[in-house]
Amino acid sequence: MTRRTWLQSLAATALGQRTQRPNVILAMADDQGWGDTGYNGHPVLKTPVLDEMARSGVRFDRFYSGAPVCSPTRGSCLTGRHPYRYGIFFANADTGADAPSKYALPEREVTIAEALRPLGYTSAHFGKWHLGDFAGPKQSAPTDNGFDEFFSTTRKVPTLDPDGYWTEKGRIPGVIQGDDSQLIMDRALDFIGRAAGRKQIFFTVIWFHAPHIPFLAGPKHRAPYARHPENVQHYLGSIASIDEQMGRLRRELDRLGVRRDTMLWYAADNGPEGDQRSDKSPGSAGPWRGRKRSLFEGGIRVPGILEWPSRFQKPFACKAAASTSDYFATVLKAAGVSVPKSDGLDGIDLLPLLERRAAKRESPLGFETMGDTRGSPKLAWIEDRYKLLSNLGESPDELYDVQSDPAETTNLADRLPRERSRMRDRLIAWRASCERSRQRR
C-alpha cells in the first residue's frame, strides 16, 4: 500500500468511528538550543511559560530534531519520515525572502494535515514554512499539503518588522510592523478561535522564526537583559517573546474551553547557531557537544514538551528518545488511526511510552546530513543506550553510551567492536531503505 492509497482509505475508516479526537498544535522555535530554557538551567534567560509547561505536562529529556538543520526537520514533523526519504537534504536557499528554494516537499508525501482532513479537521500553518515556494517551479505551499489556510514565509525573516509573508490569497506586500512572534500568534489565535466557534477540531502548526538570525527583540523583551551585550539582549529577548506568546496561546485555549482536549507540542528544529557559544552566537546547547549542523547531541537534542491535560494530568519526565518524526504516528493514533508499519516510516507512536506501557524506545533513530557538520560524522544511529556516528569508512567510527555519557566524551568504538559492527549494519540497511523510498514515485 502506498502512502497515497492509505490516505484515500482514511475517509472510509473515519465514517464508522466515534472517537473523541483532540485538537493538535505543533509549536516550534528556530535554532533554540537545548539549554535555551529556564527549565533546562539557563543562568540568565527567563522562560516562565515553557517552564510551567515542562512542570505540568510531559517533559522530554531526550528529544531529537529530525535533522541538524531546519528544512529537513520541518519535513520530518509533517511526514513522520526522515528527510533523506524524499529528497530534502539540507536547508533551503536563504539569501532572501523570495530566493528560489532548492528543495520542495514532493506531492507523493502524505502530511499530518492531509491525513487529518478526512477525520474532520481544519488545518492551518503559521510562520516559517521552508519546505518549498508559494509559487513557481518549486511550489509546495501549505495549501498544496493539506492545510486550509496559512500566514507563512518561505524561509527566515527578521524577528521584528518582517517582510516576506504570504497567505493562501497571495503575497502580503511590504514590511509588517511588529514583533514577528506576536504577528504569528495573532493569526494563529484568530484561526483557532474561528474553529472553536464552529466546534470543529483543528490542527495548527506554529513555527516561530526566533531565535534564528537576524534575531531582533523590542525594548520590552530586551530590558531584563540590559546588562548584557546588545546581541545577547536581542537573542534572549526573542526567546522571551516566544515564551510570552506561548502564554497567550494557553490562555486563549482556556478561554475557548478547548485546552483540556488539545495536544500542544513544543520543540526546536535543531541546536543553536555558531561554532561555539559567544556574544555573536549566544545560543546554549546546554552540556551537550556540538551545535547546529552537527549530529553530536548539541546539534539535534532540543527542548521538547507536550501538554494534553485530559490525557496526561500528572507531570511526567520521559527519559526515552523521542523525535519530531514521531509526531505523525502519535497524532494519528491519538485521532483514532493506526499508521501502517513499513520501512518508509521512521517515527513511532509515542503513546505507549507516555502511558508507561513501554519502558524504552525499541525503534532506533537514523540520521544523515550533508555540508559542514562542524566536526561530526554525517550519519548517526541512536538506540536506547548507544549512539553510533559514522562516515562509513571515510573516518573512524565513534560510539558513545548516551545514557551514561550523554556529553559524548568517551569513544567506545574500539572497546565494543561487536556493538559497533551490529549498529553499523543497521545504519547501512536503514540508509538503503531511505534510498528505496526516494526512488518510489
Image (cartoon, helix red, strand yellow):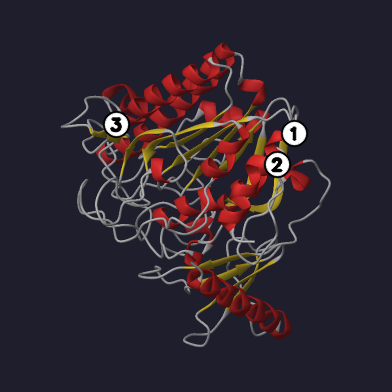
Residue 198 is at least partly visible in this image? yes
Residue placed under numbered mark 3 in the picture? 217
Find residue 96 and report its horizontal and vertical position in percent.
Answer: 20, 49
**C-alpha distance separating marks 3 and 2:** 47 Å
The three-letter code of the residue at mark 3 reads: Ala
Q: In the current view of this chain or complex, which residue is farthest to the left?
A: 174
Query: Disc 2 marks which residue?
Result: 13
- Classify mark 3: residues with Cα within 10 Å, few (<14), some (14-19) or many (20+): many
Which residue corresponds to the image point at 73% horizontal and 37% vertical from the top-left? 316
Label 1 belongs to which residue? 17
Q: Looking at the picture, does residue 304 appear above or below residue 243? A: below
Residue 314 quadrant = top right
Distance between the alpha carbons at the discs numbered 3 and 1:
47 Å
Q: What residue is drawn where x is 31% and y is 31%?
A: 180
- In percent of the image, x 60 and y 46: which residue is there? 327
Q: Nearer the viewer, mark 3 or mark 1?
A: 1
Q: Residues within 10 Å of mark 1 (few under 14, many from 20)?
A: few
Query: Which numbered disc, 3 or 1, marks the residue that appears first in the sequence?
Result: 1
Residue 190, compared with residue 7, is above or below; it is above
Q: Position of residue 227 (x, y in %)?
A: 31, 32
The tag earlier along the polypeptide, 3 or 2, is 2
| Amino acid beneath label 1 | Gln
Q: Amino acid at mark 2?
A: Thr
Q: Are marks 2 and 1 in contact (CB under 8 Å)?
A: yes
Mark 3 touching mark 2, by CB under 8 A?
no
Residue at disc 3, secondary structure: loop
Q: Tell me if residue 352 comes above or below residue 66 in the rendering.
A: above
